[in-house]
Amino acid sequence: MTPGEFRTDLETFDARTHVLRCFGALDITSMMVCRQAVMQVTAPCLVLDLRELSFLDSSGIAVLLIAQRRHRGGRLATCVRPGGRVARILALAGLEPALGVSPSIAGAVAALSPADGTPRPADLENPPA
């Protein structure tokens, strides 16, 4: 993989949760690859692991919002490197609550709604449009 090249890896965390690891630059040139990966997730819950993203632009944010809509009701969480570029972008965009941002996979999984579908507090405060 060349620097900035985008790729994803989908892993099973448990029976109800998949982890989609994203690497490289998530931008206009790679957004469809990421969108397709999000749409192929069959588990009810998804953790987006963005710790290895080197770049995120508005096209990439659009894909994150697609993932958020697809996994409504607290079934999406996002893992980012604390203090990193992607974390700062999500904070500036005000998307941390809606995307369930956490610094670790374990924390992201813990932020997911229980299996009964009870929404997380952040979902109640920021319902999807």
Image: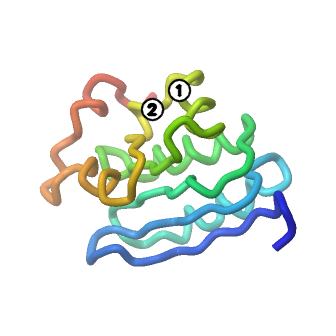
Q: Earlier in the sequence, mark 2 or mark 1?
A: 1
**Horizontally, is 50 left or right of 62 in the view?**
left
Residue 10 location (% of width, % of height): 53, 74
Residue at 42% x, 47% y is: 103
Image spot of residue 17 (x, y percent): 33, 68
Please determine whether, in this image, residue 32 is positioned above or below residue 59.
below
Tell me which corner region of the image, top left, top right, bottom left or bottom right, holds residue 116.
bottom left
Regarding mark 1 in the picture, which secondary structure is present there?
helix
* Residue appearing at x 21%, y 41% in the figure: 119
The answer to whether 15 is drawn above or below residue 53 in the figure is below
In the drawing, does residue 49 fall left or right of residue 26? left
For residue 81, the mark is none
Q: Nearer the viewer, residue 68 or 112?
A: 112
Q: Amino acid at mark 1?
A: Ala
Say if mark 2 contacts mark 1, CB within 8 Å.
Answer: yes
Task: Using a 10 Å C-alpha cutoff, classify the residue at mark 1 as few (fewer than 14 neighbours), some (14 to 19) or many (20 or more).
Answer: few
The C terminus sits in image quarter: top left
Residue 91, label in figure: 1
Horizontal arrangement in the rendering, residue 99 relative to residue 91 (left or right): left
**Could you say which is closer to the camera, residue 99 or residue 104?**
104
On the image, the x and y values in percent for residue 62 come to: 65, 40
Color style of the picture? rainbow
What residue is pinned by disc 2?
96
Q: What SS does tag 2 mark?
A: helix
